[in-house]
Image (spheres, rainbow, N blue to C red):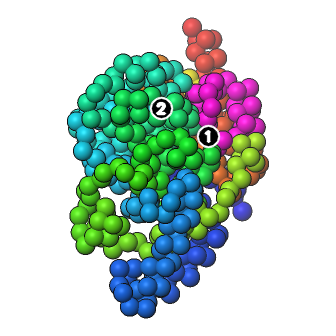
């Protein structure tokens, strides 16, 4: 049997067995959660139980949770549902934030991908403003100083939206303690199903529905709720995955690839425990992804939201990484089902690619 290694958890996680079981049981729920009869009430009870678990992920009351079709819709609702005069977003945000509206203003980041707090402070004024900053970057794993950002923003009366899709479930994230006003979540990044997420709205924040309908989700998001998906989301939220073994695997991987000459991005700042973004000049992203796939190793060249294409990373560009090096970047992201065998298979396959690059360079030197 051919060995394979799935190492693209930031694109989507392997579904947890408990989630699969909870969703299988949910197929027996035939009621619409908005119906008042007994099967509708049973469906509603199951949905509200899931809402409790999702709320628990970020330490908030259940009525702060608005279910959506995923993280992208949650981002869109946050950026378009508040009544503000301007929207500031960091340069390394996910495309769902950067493309949510045409009038966003970009905040620069430093070489590690972190918000420049002094630049942010200079941009804040008395206008009604929404600031959107992701908790942790989906490509590099770099963790933003969210509490400091919220404190700075709130001094100016600025609302803060945080895309916590990659962070929640991997690192501690207490929404009230951090001070976020709006937080986006997604089920399939934490072992849940694709196609369901949530926007968590602090009490007191005024939000208007973008998708209007029959008044579901307290009139914040119209349309019959995805009951089975929501139950899966709740099951994933209830399951607390220990990421310390994942961190050990990630660190072991990085020791070995650095010995082979890899440049690791955002290495000098706090990162997600499962994420490594790195490059070796002369070995293009596309070539690596394809060659590794043929070897049974599945990684990505960054975000998996570009219709299956391999493009230069806007994140690395914002970090002012040289184009030639950025063109060679790949992302390895691990998860609850990752094993030491996966690391060994990756290093074995990647070593062969590195050796070919060295041979090509040696041949060029001799030819000259």
Q: Nearer the viewer, mark 2 or mark 1?
A: 2
- Horizontal and vertical percent for residue 357? 61, 26
Crowd class of label 2 (few under 14; some 14 to 19; many from 20; radius 10 Å): some
Q: Position of residue 249 (x, y in %)?
A: 74, 43
Which of these two is toward me, 324 or 360?
Answer: 324
CA separation, marks 2 and 1?
A: 22 Å
Which quadrant does the N terminus fall into?
A: bottom right
Q: Number of callouts in the render?
A: 2
Which numbered circle lies on residue 151?
2
Residue at the (50%, 67%) spot, across then down: 51
Q: Residue at x 58, y 27 (%)?
A: 266
Residue 271 on the magenta segment: yes
The answer to which image quadrant residue 65 occupies is: bottom left
Point out the stretch of residues depicted in magenta: 250-279
The label number, if any, that marks residue 23 in the structure image: none
Residue at the spot 43% in from the left edge and 89% down from the top edge: 39
Instruction: Identify the residue under disc 1.
Output: 272
93 left or right, relative to 25: left
Q: Residues within 10 Å of mark 1 (few under 14, many from 20)?
A: many
Give the answer, above or below, for where 189 lies relative to 264: below
Element under label 1? Answer: loop
Closest to the observer: 229 or 150?
150
Q: Is residue 38 magenta?
A: no
């Amino acid at each position: 049997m051919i060995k394979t290694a799935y190492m693209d958890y930031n694109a989507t996680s392997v579904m947890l067995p408990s989630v699969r079981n909870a969703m299988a049981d949910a197929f027996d729920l035939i009621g619409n959660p908005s119906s008042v009869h007994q099967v509708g009430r049973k469906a509603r009870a199951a949905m509200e139980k899931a809402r409790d678990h999702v709320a628990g992920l970020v330490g908030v009351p259940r009525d702060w949770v608005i279910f959506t079709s995923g993280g992208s819709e949650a981002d869109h609702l946050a950026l378009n549902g508040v009544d503000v005069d301007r929207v500031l977003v960091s340069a390394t945000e996910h495309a769902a934030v950067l493309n949510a509206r045409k009038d966003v203003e970009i905040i620069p980041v430093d070489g590690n991908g972190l918000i420049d707090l002094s630049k942010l402070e200079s941009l804040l004024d008395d206008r009604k403003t929404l600031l959107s900053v992701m908790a942790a970057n989906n490509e590099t794993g770099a963790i933003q100083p969210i509490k400091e950002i919220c404190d700075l923003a709130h001094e100016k009366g600025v609302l803060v939206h945080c895309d916590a899709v990659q962070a929640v479930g991997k690192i501690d994230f207490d929404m009230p303690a951090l001070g976020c006003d709006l937080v986006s979540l997604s089920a399939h990044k934490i072992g849940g199903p694709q196609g369901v997420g949530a926007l968590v709205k602090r009490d007191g924040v005024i939000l208007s529905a973008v998708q209007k309908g029959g008044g579901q989700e307290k009139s914040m998001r119209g349309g019959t709720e995805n009951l089975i998906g929501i139950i899966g989301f709740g099951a994933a939220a209830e399951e607390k995955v220990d990421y310390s073994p994942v961190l050990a695997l990630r660190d072991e991987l990085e020791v070995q690839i650095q010995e082979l000459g890899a440049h690791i991005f955002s290495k000098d700042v706090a990162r997600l425990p499962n994420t490594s973004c790195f490059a070796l000049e002369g070995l293009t992203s596309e070539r690596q992804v394809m060659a590794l796939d043929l070897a049974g190793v599945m990684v990505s060249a960054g975000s998996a939201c570009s219709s299956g294409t391999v493009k230069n990373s806007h994140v690395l560009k914002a970090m002012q990484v040289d184009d030639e090096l950025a063109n060679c970047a790949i992302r390895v992201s691990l998860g609850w089902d990752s094993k030491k065998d996966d690391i060994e298979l990756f290093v074995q396959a990647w070593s062969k690619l590195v050796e070919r690059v060295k041979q090509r360079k040696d041949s060029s030197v001799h030819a000259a």
